[in-house]
Image: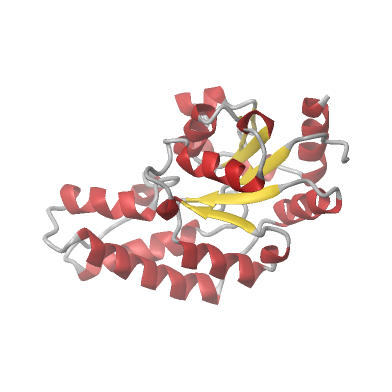
Amino acid sequence: MSDLGTLAVIFDLDGTLVDSEPNYYEASRRTLAEHGVPGFTWTDHEGYVGVSTLETVTIWRERYGLRVPVAELLAAMNRRYLDLARAHTRAYPEMRKFVELLAAENVPMAVASGSSPQAIDAILAGTGLAAFLRTVVSSDAVPHGKPAPDVFLEAARRLGVAPADCVVLEDAAPGAAAAHAAGMRCVAIPYVPAQAGAPEFATADLLLRGGQAEFTAQSAYTWLRDTAR
């Protein structure tokens, strides 16, 4: 058994393991422009960080009065995002080290994301993380996306571990809320550091207010080891 005992680790994907938000922003900007909504800004996009693609396009339809069906918007977004994701998605170096550290200790790991299964698979394959992260759950496979706990509970079920033995790594407020609702511990690494004061992050067991700039594989591993004792 590893130093972490019975602990399992569940990773959010976008903004946590990989810096994919620029790709999501560009896919969003192009999709909205195509449907007559110009001028979608990065600041606008920040409001959707941590929200599943399906929920995002559903909100757009109402917010911008779009007449196109949700399914059509979702397909357009996923197609554009996949093209961008395959071309370039960067794994955060310290996160890669952390995954490799956990893998060396045979710690059970999963990815639980609001992205489509195709996007998750493409990113994990393209970054080489697929070799370590074989248990993958998309919110498409559960009744409700984050902040509901469904995607994390399904990940725990597939890993064969109790929710109380799981630690979630998350960059967004809805994800931190989902981890709390699932009865799991949470390491919060806000993608938008200015949002670190959000009430959802107050439930995290470890909050790195500086985001990825503050995260190191070794310090995260040490915290997990101390948590397991």
Question: In which quadrant of the rendered image does the C terminus lie?
Answer: top right
User: Which residue shows up at 69% across the image and 49% down it?
Assistant: 109
Residue 12 at x, y percent in the picture? 57, 48
The answer to whether 60 appears left or right of 65 in the picture is right
Image position, residue 207 (x, y; %): 62, 30
Q: Between 121 and 209, which is closer to the camera in this rendering?
A: 121
- Give the number of callouts: 0
Q: Is residue 128 left or right of residue 121?
A: right
Q: Residue at x 53, y 76 (%)?
A: 87
Is residue 89 visible from the viewing direction of this image?
no
Q: Nearer the viewer, residue 95 or 37?
A: 95
Identify the residue shown where x is 40% and y is 59%: 25
Determine the image quadrant of residue 211: top right
**Rendered-image quadrant of the N terminus:** top right
- Figure check: 57 above or below 196: below
The colour scheme applied to this rendered structure is secondary structure
Left or right: residue 96 versus residue 58 is: right
Picture residue at 25% right of the left edge, 51% below the top: 58
Q: Can residue 31 be spotted in the picture?
A: yes
Taking 47 as reference, is 137 above or below it? below
Where does residue 57 sit, x and y in percent of width and height? 28, 55
Please determine whether, in this image, residue 150 is positioned above or below residue 72.
above
**Residue situated in front as seen by the camera: 111 or 27:** 111
Residue 162, x across and y down, in percent:
64, 33
